[in-house]
Amino acid sequence: MRKRHHVSRNASGSSDKTGTWYRDDQLRAAAKFLANKPKPSILLGDLNVTPWSSPFQHLLRQGGLRDTAIGFGIHPTWPSYLWPMRIPIDHCLVSPGLRATKREVGRNVGSDHFPLLIELEFESAIQHSRSDFPIRARRSIQGPNK
């Protein structure tokens, strides 16, 4: 099984100046941590930022990450109870070497956030000559019992 790093975050969601500074500091720390780790890496969770925000763009650049939403559209996940105001603040970011093959918003599970459903595969699997390799790569990301 290939080694990977997974970081799950729920960055501070306070909208006051202190809460915003704390959230941005958490995102900077995550970027620094992942930039210094062997690849592949996955960062996922409620980051409390939209993909067009400056802290999010900084996280991508400094962490060497890619947004799995690219090519799949905008997936608003919060708040689940207020359709016209939903925004995408739950994310799955990956390092080079991984890519999303499927990404969608799941059904309401009783939270104020909708879940993200994402399938990942190793990019090297795309060029591999054996047709079953991408399936094995996906299984290694999901774990041995999936």
Image (spheres, rainbow, N blue to C red):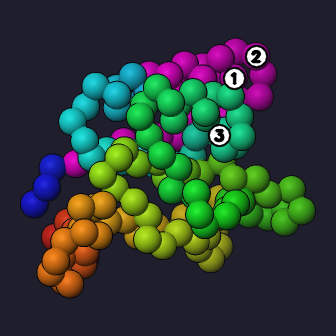
| Label 3: which secondary element | loop
Query: What amino acid does circle 3 point to?
Result: Asn
Q: Residue at x 40, y 48 (%)?
A: 94
Q: Mark 1 points at which residue?
A: 20
Question: Quick check: marks 1 and 2 in contact, CB under 8 Å?
Answer: yes
Answer with left or right where residue 118 lies relative to residue 136.
Answer: right
Image quadrant in which the C terminus is located: bottom left
| Label 1: which secondary element | helix
Q: Position of residue 140 (x, y in %)?
A: 20, 66
Q: Residue 17 carries which label?
A: 2
Image quadrant in which the N terminus is located: bottom left
Q: Residue at x 68, y 22 (%)?
A: 19
Q: Residue furthest toward the bottom?
A: 131
Query: What amino acid does circle 1 point to?
Result: Thr
Q: Marks 1 and 2, how far apart in space?
A: 5 Å
Q: What stretch is highlighted in magenta?
A: 4-29
Answer with left or right where residue 10 lies relative to residue 33.
Answer: right
Given residues 90 and 112, the one toward you in this image is 90
Q: Residue 105's quadrant in the figure?
A: bottom right
Q: Where is residue 124 in the image (x, y as percent from the top left)?
A: 24, 61
**Residue 115 in view in this figure:** no
Q: Marks 1 and 3, how far apart in space?
A: 9 Å
Query: What amino acid does circle 2 point to?
Result: Lys
